[in-house]
Amino acid sequence: MPVFNLANEIQGTWWLESRVDVTVTGTRVIDPTLGEDPIAILVYAGDHFAAQFMKRDRTEATISQITTAGLNNTAAVGGYDAYFGTFRVDKDTSLVAHTLIGSINPSNIGLTVQRQLTVEGGKLIIRLDTTTSDGNPIVRTLTWNRLS
C-alpha cells in the first residue's frame, strides 16, 4: 500500500474554488481587501510555491486601497496579493510552513506563515488561523481545484 506524502500530493497547479472566513462564533466575514469571491492560482513545484490572488471586482479605486496583514498572513496591495517562496511540510501535523522569498508587498518578504493542508477528493483544502484587519480572530478556509 502506498504511503501518503503530503508534499507529493500538493504538487501541481491549483485554481481557487472558494475562500471563506469565519469567526469563532461561526459568523462569516467578508475580507474587504480581496472580497467575497477572489480569483486565485497556486502552484507547488518541488519545495517551492507561488500564489496570486485578485479581488474579482478590482477597480481603479481598489488600486489605492491600503491593507494591513492579519496575524499569520500576508498584506495585499490594491486588491492584489502575489508571493512566492519555499515550503516545508511537518509530516506529523500536516502543518506547512511557507517562507516568502518574493512578494508584491515588500513587508511580506521573509515572512513565514503556517497553513494546515489536506487533499480530499482531488481538492486541496488550506486552513489557517488569522485575524481580520481590525484584529478579530478568524479561520480562513481555501478550497482549490487541481488544474495539473
Image: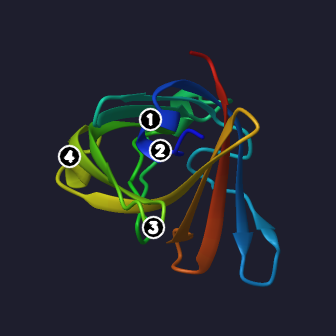
Looking at numbered disc 2 in the image, what kind of residue is underneath it? Asn
The residue drawn where x is 22% and y is 54% is 107
Lower sequence index among marks 3 and 4: 3
Q: Which SS class for mark 3?
A: loop
Q: Which residue is mark 4?
A: 106
Residue drawn at the location 61% of the way across and 17% of the way down: 147
- Specify the amino acid type for callout 3: Gly
Q: Residue furthest top?
A: 148
User: Residue 48 appears in which quarter of the rendering?
Assistant: top left
Q: CA distance from mark 4 to mark 2?
A: 33 Å
Q: Position of residue 116 (x, y in %)?
A: 53, 60
**Mark with earlier residue (4, 2):** 2
Mark 3 or mark 1, which has the lower sequence index?
1
- Amino acid of disc 4: Pro
Q: Residues within 10 Å of mark 3 (few under 14, many from 20)?
A: some
* Front residue of 10 and 141: 10
Q: Of callouts 2 and 3, which one flags the residue occurring earlier in the amino acid sequence?
A: 2
Among numbered discs 1 and 4, the one appearing first in the sequence:
1
Q: Residues within 10 Å of mark 1 (few under 14, many from 20)?
A: few
Split into 4 quadrants, where in the image is the C terminus?
top right
Provide residue 4's location: percent of width, then percent of height. Answer: 54, 45
The residue under label 3 is 70
On the question of residue 63 being in view, the answer is: no
The residue tagged 2 is 5
Looking at the rendered structure, the secondary structure element under dot 1 is: helix
Instruction: Mark 4: give few (<14), some (14-19) or many (20+) Cα within 10 Å.
Output: few
